[in-house]
Amino acid sequence: MKFKLIYIIFVLTLSSQAQEIAVLKYKGGGDWYSNPTALPNLIAFCNDNINTTIKSKPETVEVGSTDIFQYPFVHMTGHGNVFFSQDEAINLKNYLMSGGFLHIDDNYGMKSYIIQELKKVFPNKKLQELPSSHPIFNQTFTFSKGLPKIHEHDGLAPKALGIFDNNRLVLLFTYESDLGDGWEDASVHNDPFEVRQKALQMGANIIQYAFEH
């Protein structure tokens, strides 16, 4: 009974909040704070193009904090190690199961660590590759071939993997794409305008999907 009450409170908290997003701070030594200009640029793009009203500066939230339930969308990135304690894994699972959405964008070198830690969060669920027909690729902007390639890294095809709960995508893991680098100020990576636009448009689709589902 107590768990059900907490669950209801969490759902109401998520549903009553304005459109806001946060960066996930995690342990393990990985640089959770990388790409500092990425989210502010994506927020500005979303507010200009998909009618959102997100605060210009995202908040920071820790994996194990109940503050995470204030945000319908949480973004996670980095290059290296990730570690979730058991309590943090439970908190993150409760957040996702009660209406939250987590986008994990591999900034190169994160994949092996995050996949291992996600087993703590969802021991009975596996990451599934999203087909290009999934609604997340067909929001305001259409990506008929699925996730766009922003940076080369290992030269492999970009992948969008997800975890679902009752057919709702609750977690999106993007790698071999590096959307966050494409959201950064143009001077950081010197990406062409067209590449940055693709990254921002895909990012806007992700946020729009999260807010609407």
Image: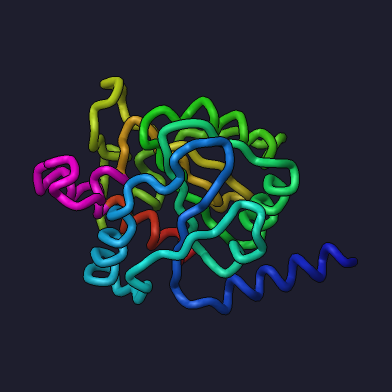
Residue extent of the magenta highlight: 180-201
Q: Where, quadrant-wise, is the N terminus in this rendering? A: bottom right
The secondary structure making up most of the magenta span is: helix
Q: Which residue: 61% across, 37% down?
A: 83
Q: Which residue: 49% across, 60% down?
A: 60
Q: Can you give x and y, in whole percent of width and height, for residue 10 in the image?
A: 68, 68
Q: Can you give x and y, in whole percent of width and height, for residue 64 in the image?
A: 66, 53
Occupied quadrant, residue 178:
top left
**Can you see residue 61?**
yes
Q: Which residue: 25% across, 53% down?
A: 200
Q: Which residue: 31% across, 64% down?
A: 43
The reply, left or right, for residue 15 in relation to residue 160 is right
Check the image and report above or below for 132 versus 71: above
Q: Can you give x and y, in whole percent of width and height, for residue 184 in the image?
A: 24, 50
* Model colouring: rainbow
Query: Residue 153 in magenta?
Result: no
* Residue, far right: 1
**Can you see residue 140?**
no
The reply, left or right, for residue 121 in relation to residue 137 is right
